[in-house]
Amino acid sequence: MKVEIDKYAGFCSGVIKAIGMAEKYSADGFEISCLGEIVHNSQEEKRLNSLGMKTIGYNDFEDLNGKRILIRAHGEPPETYEKAKELGIEIIDATCPIVLNLQRKIKQKYIENPECQIVIYGKKGHAEVNGLVGQTNGKAIVISNMAEANLLDLTKQTFVFSQTTSNNNEYEKIGEFLKNKSIEIFGNDDNIVIYNTICPSVKNRIPKLKEFCKDFDVIIFVSDEKSSNGKMLFSVCKENNVNSFFISSPDELENSWFSDAATVGVSGGTSTPLWLMEEVRNKILKLLTK
Ligand code: SF4
């Protein structure tokens, strides 16, 4: 039986940076609280909590009394920085540079064209999306699907951006739809500008994951229900290998999945730690040797 971990799976550079900062400040004995879950992976979250990092919500913010907060890779809207300043809270900023760059781009477009329509394709309420909307004083419109794209007012100058972890295919389809609709109504698409702002760490994983899925009888994809990129990458697994299963911890593995399997591939999202995929691989090997 061959059980192999996908060599391209695991943390992206943004998550590596955020976790490195959490580990560093915890090891130095600083009291550090992360605003929201540092990654959408409860197993990794628990590990960091055990090192001393606390996870707090927005409602706990005022109780920090001048201590430190860690801003995770997803970033935050400007109000969070303002509130921290008001309360004398020191910010340790682990916003991913790719997200920071996107925030700046959106802010610049908004300042240059305050009357324009800024559209963000992503998950409503997701921390990164909230941070992006915050660059426009809350005016950006968040869309999650084609039906919502169809409701946009195309008479306005429209700039469309994507959450960094969105599905590239869906985003391309939405971009094409908006342009075609504009051409149909106005005879041109001059009013619509689509920016491809999906992170290369996510986009480039797709062709590699497709190949990986074809090499194994069964695919075990390790992620967390809350992870946007995890859900999107799992849909790639399902499309390319019907015997793909989504789990969050080794305890969820089922013997029956492997009854006809000679090879098993283990993969994960950009917020799945390698140690967790290794635990999954070891548990599969244990199950199969019983
Ligand atoms: S997926 Fe990309 S943008 Fe998001 S944290 Fe990772 S490296 Fe940064």
Image (cartoon, grey):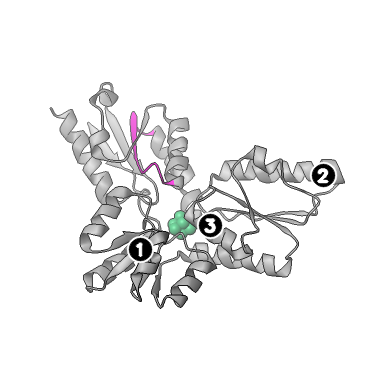
At label 3, which amino acid type do we have?
Answer: Asn
Q: What stretch is highlighted in magenta?
A: 215-227
- Please determine whether, in this image, residue 261 is positioned above or below residue 25: above
Q: In the image, which disc is placed on residue 183?
A: 2
Q: Mark 3 points at which residue?
A: 130
- What is the x, y in percent for residue 46? 26, 53
Q: Which corner quadrant holds the N terminus?
A: top left
- Upstream in sequence: badge 3 or badge 2: 3
Marks counted in the figure total 3
- Upstream in sequence: badge 3 or badge 1: 1
Q: How far separated are the C-alphas under marks 3 and 2?
A: 31 Å
- What is the x, y in percent for residue 225? 39, 41
- Please determine whether, in this image, residue 83 is positioned above or below residue 229: below
Q: In the image, which disc is placed on residue 34?
A: 1
At label 1, which amino acid type do we have?
Answer: Cys
Q: Quadrant of residue 48?
A: bottom left
- What is the x, y in percent for residue 251? 23, 36
Q: In which quarter of the image is residue 21?
A: bottom left
At label 2, which amino acid type do we have?
Answer: Ile
Residue shown at 43% from the left, 38% from the top: 234
